[in-house]
Image (tube, helix red, strand yellow):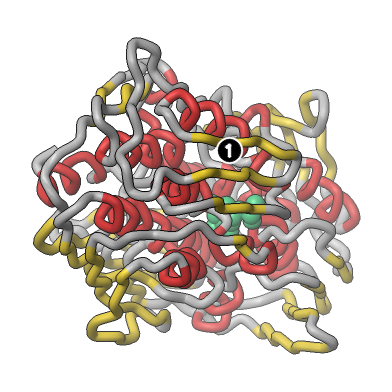
Amino acid sequence: MSHANIPTPRNFKPGAPLTGRITVPGDKSISHRSLMFGALAVGRTTAKDLLEGEDVMATAAAMRAMGARIVREDDGTWTIDGVGVGGLLQPETALDMGNSGTSTRLLLGVVASHGITATFTGDASLSKRPMGRVIEPLSLMGADFTSSPGGRLPLTMRGAHPAVPIEYRLPVASAQVKSAVLLAGLNTPGVTRVIEPVATRDHTERMLTGFGADLTVEEVNGERIIDIRGEAELRPQDIVVPGDPSSAAFFVVAALLVPGSDLVVANVGLNPTRAALFDVLRAMGGSIEEVDRRDVGGEPVADLRVRHSELSGIEVDPAVAPAMIDEFPVLFVAAALAKGRTVTTGLDELRVKESDRLSAMAEALTLAGASVEEREDGLVIEGTGGEPLAGTSGEPVTTHLDHRIAMSMAVAGLASRSGVEVDDTSPIATSFPTFEALLAQASGA
Ligand code: S3P
């Protein structure tokens, strides 16, 4: 995708307090699923407040290439005319997944139980990420793969029809792997079962139930057992996508760190499998108040009023990691300005995200003047006690094609003396195209 080609550097300078009210765009996970499930339903699904970032657009293009009609109407609503489970067509060209691991892993699941062949390609970051974690269960279901060395993209998959139902215990806490198996199960006769020893985001389960799939979730001895019965027929839905807590996170941390800030971040999804960052920040002393808690599209949502706060370091319980897995980069920034030491453990999964987020953040924060020790499975950060970071001088921090590294270091720049130079802001468009405009709106930065 375009961001891979045109690096756009920027120096994020300390600015005015963050004030007023901003609204974050739609949730990325729910937006991907809205397009995929709508494309698999019989009839017309609509989606309001869909995230129009590059990752979600990669999903839209792939579903179109496999036969769905997907249109953005003039009022911003998206309409999706589905082909029905089992009705996907063989794409004529390779499916370009850009930077998006979610598109890739979930679509591999979808295609696995269709009798079609598809080639998946991606950018340099995505091409380094492990796909073996989905290749393994989907092969057990009958799909066949020719992948690049190490189970990576580009890869070609021949789906199996009929596929074979499996019972699969997740070896890694990954909503993407869980979803891939469940989505393959949609078009597989019989019951496909996923056992989740550690709960991960549950949007797939919630939304497939809304679309009328025969899906049950049971908790036994602390594990989640999810059964889906195929072959399913999905009913179209009218979806309102709640705001993305992972995008809100950058503004919440920025407002906590910049003195004088008092900001309302509106429309933040607070699904309990996603919202642990806000609890951790509160435990560090952050003033984050929920206003007008309500339900949007079957998900809990609230406006968050965030005021500048003195934060204290914390030992983050690794058990909460899955519920804030994308938020660690920006938590590390908060920790860098807290009083005392923050210790994080159990974060091996961060090494296989859009970048190795442990080493990328350790390197970037150190360059910006923070005191960081990188360990195998987490970072240990000695905070400044509220003093701004020195900032970078001359050498920019490296984002490694990772939107969340770019946005986290932008927040670090707001809380620095001289600013933080980021080598490339273009990856931000994958998940949060309005980030810089909202930053300008809230702080004039
Ligand atoms: C996602 C799951 C998470 C997350 C990603 C989106 C999803 O990945 O990091 O941004 O929508 O299912 P893993 O399942 O690999 O942890």
Quadrant where the image shows the C terminus: top left
Residue 209 % position (x, y): 57, 82
Quadrant of residue 311 within the rendered picture: bottom left
- 223, above or below 57, in the image: below
Quadrant where the image shows the N terminus: top left
Residue at 23% from the left image edge and 50% from the top image edge: 258
Viewer can see residue 8: yes
How many residues crowd around disc 1 within 10 Å: few (fewer than 14), some, or many (20 or more)? Answer: many
Residue at 25% from the left image edge and 39% from the top image edge: 414
Residue at 86% from the left image edge and 58% from the top image edge: 141
Quadrant of residue 164 within the rendered picture: bottom right
Instruction: Work out whether residue 428 or residue 39 is closer to the camera in this orientation and state it.
Output: 428
Circle 1: element type: helix
For mark 1, what is the residue?
357
Residue 346 % position (x, y): 72, 54
Question: Which kind of residue does numbered mark 1 sit on?
Answer: Arg
Quadrant of residue 408 within the rendered picture: top left
Residue 7 % position (x, y): 36, 17
> Does mark 1 have its CB less than 8 Å from ligand 1?
no
Residue 277 % position (x, y): 47, 64
Q: Ligand 1 is located in which of the four quadrants? A: bottom right
Furthest toward the top, the residue is 394
Residue at 41% from the left image edge and 43% from the top image edge: 384
